[in-house]
Amino acid sequence: MSALPGPAFDPAPPGVELLERSLAYTRAALVTVGPQHLSLPTPCDHWRLGDLLAHMEDALDAFGEGAGGAIDLHSQAPAPLELRIISLQEKACALLGGWLAARSPYVDVAGHPVAVDTIARLAAVEITVHGWDVGRVTGHSVPVPDALAAELLPTAVALALDHPDGFGRPLPVPDTAGSGDRLLATLGRCP
């Protein structure tokens, strides 16, 4: 994934603002993690919280590198919990800064231009849902704000249709469910 050449664009696309809100939501969940939580199961099938945190770190690296022009996926050995949480928070801030400074409205993904807004929305969905997962494991689950969830829902539906095994199979929700519950259920979470 590399940024296509061109002048900086302004203003930042709406997806970048969504990314900022998703990062704020997830940072609040990360501070609730303690060593006793790392081996607990998550809403992600067959994953423990330690696995999820490693996945989140890899995802932040990938999305951050995409904003900078290239992706070099690599996994490092897990750091001690305190360092991992600090690293996740620092990478979240760097990710937002990277996308705000993007020089092109498109990112090259395997030879195909993809709008920065689309990539930012995908990152926002991933970060928000995994932030909810973290809070669920630690017992400090905070509902996804309805306004954020409503804006992320179309991207989540597209993800569920294009990659049905990526998060989890969609679950039914009552007609009266709010946007937060719909977002989570779309990606296989039981709100």
Image (tube, rainbow, N blue to C red):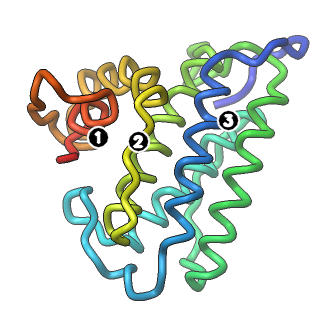
Circle 3 residue: 66
Q: Position of residue 177 (x, y in %)?
A: 20, 29
Q: Nearer the viewer, mark 2 or mark 1?
A: 2
Report, in whole angstroms, how far the alpha carbon at label 2 lies from the one at label 1: 20 Å
Give the residue at x 58% y 16%.
Answer: 114
Across and down, in percent, residue 189 comes to: 22, 46
Q: As drawn, which residue projects farthest toward the right?
A: 7
Q: Residue at x 67, y 51 (%)?
A: 92
Three-letter code, disc 3? Gly
Q: Which of marks 2 and 3 is nearer the N terminus?
A: 3
- Residue 30 is left or right of residue 4, and the answer is left
Which residue in the structure is indicated by mark 1?
166
Q: Say what amino acid the circle numbered 1 marks.
A: Gly
- In the rendered image, the vertical position of residue 126 relative to residue 60, given as above or below: above
Q: Which structural element holds mark 3?
A: helix
Label 2 vs 1, first from the N-terminus: 2
Lateral position of residue 86 relative to residue 112, left or right = right
2 and 3 marks in contact (CB < 8 Å): no
Cα distance between the residues tagged 3 and 1: 20 Å
User: Is 31 placed left or right of 179 in the picture?
Assistant: right
Front position in the image: 167 or 3: 167
Question: Relative to residue 138, is residue 183 depicted above or below?
Answer: above
Q: Mark 2 points at which residue?
A: 144
